[in-house]
Image (cartoon, coloured by chain):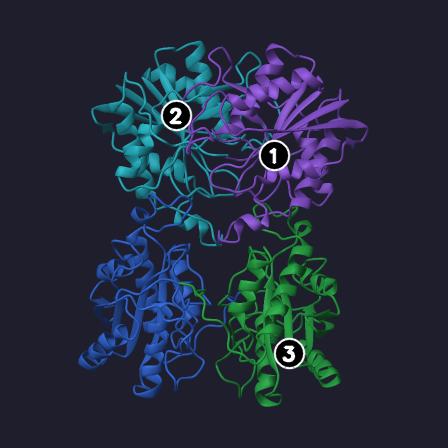
Chain colours: A purple, B cyan, C blue, D green
Amino acid sequence: MKILISGFDPFGGEKINPAYEAVKLLPDSIKGAEIVKLEIPTVFHKAAEVLEEKVKEVDPDVILCIGQAGGRYGVTPERVAINVDDARIPDNEQKQPIDVKIKEDGPSAYFSTLPIKSMVEKMKEAKVPSSVSNSAGTFVCNHIMYQILYMIDKKYPQKTGGFIHCPFIPEQVIDKPNQPSMNLSDIARGLEAGIEAIVERDGKEDIKEIGGAIH
Amino acid sequence: MKILISGFDPFGGEKINPAYEAVKLLPDSIKGAEIVKLEIPTVFHKAAEVLEEKVKEVDPDVILCIGQAGGRYGVTPERVAINVDDARIPDNEQKQPIDVKIKEDGPSAYFSTLPIKSMVEKMKEAKVPSSVSNSAGTFVCNHIMYQILYMIDKKYPQKTGGFIHCPFIPEQVIDKPNQPSMNLSDIARGLEAGIEAIVERDGKEDIKEIGGAIH
Amino acid sequence: MKILISGFDPFGGEKINPAYEAVKLLPDSIKGAEIVKLEIPTVFHKAAEVLEEKVKEVDPDVILCIGQAGGRYGVTPERVAINVDDARIPDNEQKQPIDVKIKEDGPSAYFSTLPIKSMVEKMKEAKVPSSVSNSAGTFVCNHIMYQILYMIDKKYPQKTGGFIHCPFIPEQVIDKPNQPSMNLSDIARGLEAGIEAIVERDGKEDIKEIGGAIH
Amino acid sequence: MKILISGFDPFGGEKINPAYEAVKLLPDSIKGAEIVKLEIPTVFHKAAEVLEEKVKEVDPDVILCIGQAGGRYGVTPERVAINVDDARIPDNEQKQPIDVKIKEDGPSAYFSTLPIKSMVEKMKEAKVPSSVSNSAGTFVCNHIMYQILYMIDKKYPQKTGGFIHCPFIPEQVIDKPNQPSMNLSDIARGLEAGIEAIVERDGKEDIKEIGGAIH
């Protein structure tokens, strides 16, 4: 089994992006699965092009992307990506689409094809705060998750894919009072636990655990 | 123009549901549009049956539903409903579906067909805190929003529809420390402003305003 | 019984100070007590001078001051004022003392001599979110509370005094996402309930109710 | 220079108290100062007795206590302890004093005699989120801080003392959604940086840095 894990470069005025820093801390093999790492640009559409190049090159079984979500308290597998770009801030090439479809011929949304409930359970067993997230936002993170699942839907139906959001790390919140953060090594442990769940549930249905949101 | 506005009965241990209490405060006519009010049960599927009965009876142009979202700081029009029921708590008939599709033949998601950016703008002009929400959760609120838009998609393509979430009201948070709340009259003012936007934008595209979420 | 209630003018870039706006909504008599209102400047020391002028003029039994505390979820009687000015922002005359004693000959702190637990109880009975606060900060609010109690301690031992902090009102948080707020009429109702408790407990000890903070 | 650092045993239903776990991670010598560690019971008055026994035994120059403050986002030196016990929950011997003075003959409050602004600055330089706190609550943490400073005031005027509050650690918030946490090693690094500031500022005044709270 081969897992391609991408993470974004820094954006929104931050100097580092803990998402890719955490990816770099991952081992090259998890539960027997080979881990291939890739940094992608925080740019609408271009992120997907760079990612697809790598998909063609390494032909992974799983396409996973990791992003930063300042304000979150835990590591959060995303349930769904929606077919809209609605940027609150410009991306790293100063593009700022407002209410534009990502793919004209795509469905309104794609659900993650990764076992998100199992991933959350494994992360919690590893003592890393975690929960399912029901919105990946409307910026480049939601965009790449949608693009991954569109790519799989249209061209690579054998592969699975999804997205995980991570909190700020402590050094990012030194001057942001009352913002939660998580140590980079804890984020990496959470990601590793999540990937273990992906490997273990391969070919099986996700577990039926409570993990929804009331609103 | 005729607008059907439904709101849920109380759930989750709360004695009142401010959503429908606020609906009751609305005038019978807003900017010339007739307002028809309906209380619906907080029960998966049954909520949709009760609502569709009323749709058949009054034949509204707009189908809007209002729900409570404890923890929110403002009145929040929802952008999208997803095709999944994943209940954290039982509904009012003790049903608790986990990761079940709402409609087997439905798309993965429906976007609101109401002018959500205009609605937020109007609410803010009325001095009511407001923002676009990108997740209606996975409980009965998301369920009814999906059902409304499925119903419109399949049977009533001339109608438009959507959902608005409201905060707790002060009396609900007396024993819930550090939970935001909003006065019922402010919620009602927010809803009225949102409905004004619906009437004013009738037949037009929504405004292109910044209002997305980074994650 | 005569109660002097002061409130600050706007500060910190805000256009209005809901504290004094709420004071203005109070009736001129509460449970038989005469209510005298006074706006004071958000300026270290000067606030106390203006207040003491009024104390001399009207000779109140109770000296109460109301201030704004953006970020709070309820109306919060303060337990204690400490003998330090430590300004995070300049006051309205651009003074910004850092770690300076308010009164060289004053004690390290003064406890409110108002029945704060009874006040919280009354506010909650009136369905207004409320709790005891254990810190009035280190800006002009803590300063005036300390000055009131110093004044009473040194010159007017027959009088009682204290301070109540109020949340933002909705119009102040329109462009501050995820900040709690409270309708001005609810703040005024909370203040009125608190004042009722002051009148009713006159000459008696405060109630022994749970209301402390673990940290 | 000798520094006695105490930390509480678990309380309030928690299985561990990260405060003392972090203390255990500290080296035995920091910037040349000897570090003596002590676990104390989360019990009103008894905590102080156990602590004073140790003070007599090791005769430290600095008496520092570390406690847990669930809900905090950073490591927070406390500015002041107030002369009141007001327990929201029972202590570990089921005592729950309500609005009782800690010391009948003590002043209303004691300010920390440690350089709290320097400590915060050093912690931030070490990339550990930190800020001055203006309330240690009204439970056993405030109690022991008050007792330390009373002890110093009455018997050991050559010594200095104070208190630092720490956040939850990640494993404590696995089932507490939206509660901030901090890795134990980061808490320990923060404490070490704070102690470095204590050693470096020994015999000097604290720095005059902005660090107050508006309310």
Whether tag 2 and tag 3 are in contact, CB under 8 A, the answer is: no
Query: A187 or A120, which is in the foreground?
Result: A187
Q: The disc numbered 1 marks a residue on which chain? A: A
- Give, as a three-letter code, the residue at label 1: Val
Mark 1, residue position: A132
Q: The disc numbered 3 marks a residue on which chain? A: D
Q: Residue at x 48, y 43 (%)?
A: B14
Number of the label disc, if any, that sits on residue C60: none
Residue A124 appears in the figure: yes
Q: Is residue A163 left or right of residue D133?
A: right
Q: Is residue C166 left or right of residue A101?
A: left
SS of the residue at dot 3?
strand
- Give, as a three-letter code, the residue at label 3: Val
Q: On the image, which quarter does residue C5 sit in?
A: bottom left
Residue B109 location (% of width, % of height)? 50, 20
Mark 2, residue position: A98
Q: On the image, which quarter does residue A125 sit in?
A: top right
How many angstroms separate mark 1 from mark 2 (CA)? Answer: 26 Å
Q: Which residue in the rendered view is the most extreme toward the right?
A: A32
Whether marks 2 and 3 lie on the same chain: no
Q: Nearer the viewer, mark 1 or mark 2?
A: 2
Residue A82 location (% of width, % of height)? 50, 23
Query: D214 or C178, which is in the foreground?
Result: D214
- Give, as a three-letter code, the residue at label 2: Ile
Q: Nearer the viewer, mark 3 or mark 1?
A: 3
* Number of other residues with Cα within 10 Å of mark 3, as a class: few under 14, some 14 to 19, many 20 or more: many
How many angstroms separate mark 2 from mark 3 (CA)? Answer: 58 Å
